[in-house]
Amino acid sequence: MATRPSEAQGYELRDPDVRLMLQVRDDDAAAFEELVLRYQSRLLTVLENLCGKRDLAEDLAQDVFLRVYRARKRYIPTSKFSTWLFKIAGNVASNARRGMARRREVNVEGRESGPWGVNPMEQMALAASGQMPTRQLDKSEVRDVVQQAVAGLSDRQRLAVLLAKFEEMNYADIGEVMDLTPQAVKSLLSRARATLRGSLESYLQSGEWTQPKLQQSGPTR
Amino acid sequence: MNSSRPPIVNPDKVREEICAYLDGELPAEDGREVEERLAAEPHFRDELQGMERAWRLLDELPHTEADEKFAATTVEMVAVRAADDLRQQQEQWPKLFVRGWVLSAGGMLLALLLGFGVVAGGAALLSQTGAIETPDDRLLADLSVLLKLDEYQQVGGSDFVRALEAANLFAPDDALPREAPIAESAKTEPGASLTERRQYVEGLTPYERKDLAERRERFLALPEETQTRLRTLERELAADPRAAELREVLDHYGEWLMTLSLEARAELRRLPQDERVAKITELRQQDSKKKERRYAAQDLRVTLAWLQEVAKRNEESLTQQSLPPGPLDTHNDAGPMRRMRLVSGLLQSWQRNGFGKNPAVTAAEFDKLKQNLSPSLRKRMEQKGGDMAAQWEALTSALLNEARPSGPGLEPRRPLDASAVQPQHRWPMLLQLSAARAESVDDQELWNFFHQLPRNERDRIKRLPREEGLQALRTLYARTQRERGDESWDGRHNPDGPGGPRRLDPGRAPRPAEFGPRPGDFRDGPELERRGPGRPGGPRRNHGPRENGPDRPEADPRESNPETPPPPPPDAAPNGL
């Protein structure tokens, strides 16, 4: 979609990161470094929660920045910089997931049923089997429970949730990242929240969770 | 959803409306309908609260912080991969087409590599060639340029430095605190012999040698004409009768530049010399005003805290006097209102008896106050001689002139003739100004304050409608400001030591603040601290979390909560939103 000059100028005026990216387009290395510094932790946070592994998230984040660099000469500010960056991140993560799924088809058998690793819902079903003793969860265990619940979302739901939660994006921006209309984002997030609520229901009601014996750490960690 | 159509009953649609309501994405009219249903339908309310609780649990998800090497390795990786791309392009494209692309892409690659590779590369070079152990004449001849490389690169020529000096924009008093650069240890004078320079280089520490090697690599990577320009600049500065002053101005200018954003620096570089000096003048004036406002607010806070401390110590005698009515609530004889009444009583007593008399203030107590004031105000007080009353008068006048609130939406400050204000009206006016200042906080300060709040408090405010959210934030800010400075009053001590942590926690009982400024309050050059360090060659870059705040760097407050109407709180009474 062509961008009107005034629209591009609007983003340039409003978004300091767009201005930095335009400097990158003009081969300003310092500006690129500055963008990396500004976004590295934000990107890693979303990617780690998306794929569940720190080392993989770091690889993906580097791939995102490489793509940003390679795309610099074609860059036209049609949205906020963060929206553009996370759109690239979503594509990178999606490609990686497909690649991993293909490799797993060939190489892996057995328990790892989800695209990023162990199916968290299976783990949660195990946990909720009622055969394990219940006890109050400590902080790290609560985190594991929440991570399992998030990992149980579909990839698209998970990305939308993470963008809303961590990046505080509105529906329009999430839609931009994911090529969806705001109405579609509304439905997607609604289903995601309902799923999360269902997954966390027993924890929400009692503050307790069954602790599965086999689950020494989070499902994808 | 609106009142002219039947309520939504499809469970999926109901859930969508609830989620959109929680996310602040519903139009106002639909939002009101949700609120009506919240009030009337318990299951609707349960659904909303369940979703909200689940959403809040996501706060437990990890926030990943990049380690300090991540940016460096990423930029290196990108540089290497981009170099591969470049090589492949060169192999495939016709020569003429490649040439222009290579010039720009190659330049950036070089810059990328210089950013992170030069230190290691320079060290390797040193070990392989022994360049420092037997420095070549070229390095020694360029030594003065290398030691000032960063500063020289920021200016066009010696005329610009002279213009800066003439404009008196970087006087020594304005120097920012900084790491000692290698140049400070240099005993090299521009006219020093090669032998002396060699001795100087041989006397450098390993770190300084590595730094010098890095500078040499960067210098040699510059275009030939730039190298010539920098050498000319060095010669002209050395030959100037005011060489020392010009170099000092250049140092301060370089340090100040590091406090600017990359965009601002780039903008300055693009301007012709005259316009650049004018722009720098404007920016320096803005800096000065910001510093003045920050100091004035802090001075008023410090003075009020000191007054409370004195009043607390003399509570009994002041109580025996007829205390004036409290500014807000004459019936409340405890807590902040009582303190304000006692402070008012103290000031009135001094008004009658003379400053520091009945109740008495010792010179040591007064010195304690002065030590916590900004250096400029302290200096102005001390210019009045040793008389405490005269110094107090100077303090009062200064506060009356400078502590008035200013900022967006407020009348511009006009000079105030403090002597025209009746003495009995001065401190009542200042007490009111203190309260008004807290209410009239500017957007940036409010934004910073917002990010110091605990997450649950931030979430609560974000869920309020925009205007309510802003008002709640201002009120919280004002309350916290008032509650600072009460520590000594209540006899409590700040366990965190002087200043204590800056993080606020209004969700708990207000933590009374200490008497005296917090760390960094009177530090010159706060911009340096806030914006982080500068480019390679300047102070070391902090590879920690995002700059300028715990959540987002350089976030414009207008781009977030204040402009995006936050959703209302799910836990509020349905009709009370």
Image: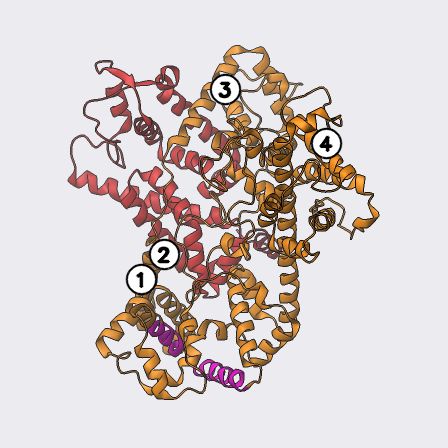
Does residue B25 appear in this view? no
- Count of numbered badges drawn on the protein: 4
What residue is pinned by disc 4? Answer: B345
Q: How is the image coloured?
A: by chain
- Marks 3 & 1 on one chain: yes
Label 3 crowding class (10 Å Cα cut-off): few <14, some 14-19, many 20+? many
Mark-to-mark CA distance, 3 and 4? 53 Å
Mark 1 belongs to chain: B
Q: Which residues, given as a range, are shown in magenta?
A: B212-239
**In whole angstroms, how far apart are the C-alphas of marks 2 and 1?**
8 Å
Is residue A104 among what the camera can see?
A: yes
Q: Chain of mark 3?
A: B
Tag 3: amino acid: Leu
Residue B48: assigned label? 3
Tag 2 residue: A66
State the CA–CA distance, disc 4 to disc 2.
67 Å
Q: CA distance from mark 3 to mark 2?
A: 42 Å
Marks 3 and 2 on same chain: no
Among numbered discs 3 and 4, the one appearing first in the sequence:
3
Point 61% across, 38% down: residue:
B305
Image location of residue B358, percent across then percent down: 70, 36
Determine whether the residue tagged by mark 4 lies in a helix, strand or loop.
helix
Say which chain tag 2 marks. A
Give B128 or B59, whichever is nearer the viewer. B128
